[in-house]
């Protein structure tokens, strides 16, 4: 058995979106993330799968989307990850408030949580997003992007799970997933691995709230990091020993994945850090071409014809 923690934080967060071009425009144009991979949903090949992140799409920075053109909006509720929080520099809130307002995005007043300042807003589909200002994050974001380097999004800060009860999920996180409880504010309870931006999970408890409805503007799943295939198998075995219904290992080309539903209803994934997004594109050209898994290559012509044309156009967002 490894002596390192099997799980070290958040790997990626995947959401359902609507219009694919609007999705790219928001996350690359307005938020300044890099489109590091353009591929398909391996389980629904007629739908794109976009990966947005830092320069190389490092684990802990990647927000991914399944954009279903014409999808109706979902609703936030329990059993969901309702807010994805990104990490920015300590002095960047004013820049981001002004930038978001410039592009017509409604922004909350400054909020404070566990001593950190933040703003809250939604994307064009109603996706819940936050920017949290922190001096504890030494990641660089995407320095070659059109956002000034000192204000670029560094990666995830954390995520909020909205649940009717915390105890079963807390038990999973703390006993099987290397998380520990560090404090609460009202009905918000915080769990961390090392306590750094990128590994933080909050449980917001409301026993009387309605369940959410998953569609455009809602999170499909949250993925947690593990080093490699060997540590992933250890996690899989541990979860199965404790009664979790875990899938077989699935090859997602850029990482390996297992999935299971946590007790509060949120779909969890455990994904490997290896091999990363540069295995089929040069680092300087990540996200430029439609990349398909080997099994889909014989159907490339049909797949490309069925997918709407999209492009990254940053000139309107500088």
Image (spheres, helix red, strand yellow):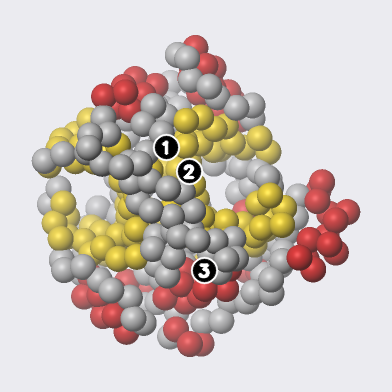
| Quarter where residue 208 is shown | top left
Measured as percent of width and height from the top left, residue 124 is found at 42, 70
Density class for disc 2 (Cα within 10 Å; few <14, some 14-19, many ≥20) is many
Residue wearing tag 1: 266
Q: Which residue is mark 2?
A: 221
Report whether 149 appears left or right of 188: right
Callouts 2 and 1 close, C-beta under 8 Å? yes
Q: Which mark is residue 23?
A: 3
What is the x, y in percent for residue 155? 39, 57
**Disc 2 versus disc 3: distance between alpha carbons?**
18 Å
The C terminus - image quarter: bottom left
Residue 78 % position (x, y): 33, 41
- Give the camera-side residue of 292 and 89: 292
Quadrant of residue 86 within the rendered picture:
bottom left
Looking at the rendered structure, the number of numbered marks drawn on it comes to 3
Is 25 above or below relative to 180? below
Front-most of 315 and 228? 315
State how far apart marks 2 and 1 are (Cα): 7 Å
């Amino acid at each position: 058995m490894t002596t390192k923690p099997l799980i070290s934080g958040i790997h990626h967060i995947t959401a359902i979106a609507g219009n694919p071009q609007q999705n790219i425009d928001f996350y690359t144009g307005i938020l300044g993330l890099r489109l590091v991979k353009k591929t398909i949903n391996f389980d629904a090949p007629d739908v794109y799968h976009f990966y947005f992140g830092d320069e190389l799409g490092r684990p802990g920075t990647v927000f991914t989307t399944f954009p279903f053109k014409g999808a109706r909006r979902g609703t936030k509720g329990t059993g969901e990850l309702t807010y994805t929080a990104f990490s920015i520099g300590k002095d960047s809130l004013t820049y981001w408030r002004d930038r978001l307002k410039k592009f017509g995005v409604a922004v909350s007043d400054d909020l404070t949580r566990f001593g950190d300042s933040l703003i809250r807003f939604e994307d064009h589909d109603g996706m819940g997003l936050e920017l949290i200002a922190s001096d504890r994050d030494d990641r660089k974001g995407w320095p070659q992007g059109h956002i000034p380097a000192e204000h670029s999004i560094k990666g995830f800060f954390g995520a909020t799970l909205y649940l009717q009860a915390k105890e079963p999920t807390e038990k999973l996180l703390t006993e099987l997933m290397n998380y520990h409880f560090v404090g609460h504010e009202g009905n918000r309870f915080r769990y961390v691995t090392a306590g750094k931006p990128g590994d933080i999970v909050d449980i917001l408890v409301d026993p009387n709230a309605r369940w959410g409805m998953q569609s455009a503007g809602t999170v499909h799943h949250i993925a947690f990091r593990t080093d490699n295939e060997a540590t992933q198998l250890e996690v899989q075995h541990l979860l199965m020993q404790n009664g979790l219904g875990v899938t077989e290992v699935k090859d997602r080309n850029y990482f390996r994945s297992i999935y299971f539903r946590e007790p509060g209803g949120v779909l969890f994934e455990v994904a490997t850090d290896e091999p990363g997004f540069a295995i089929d594109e040069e680092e300087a050209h990540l996200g430029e071409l439609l990349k398909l898994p080997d099994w889909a290559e014989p159907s490339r012509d049909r797949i490309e014809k069925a997918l709407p044309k999209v492009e990254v156009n940053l000139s309107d967002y500088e």
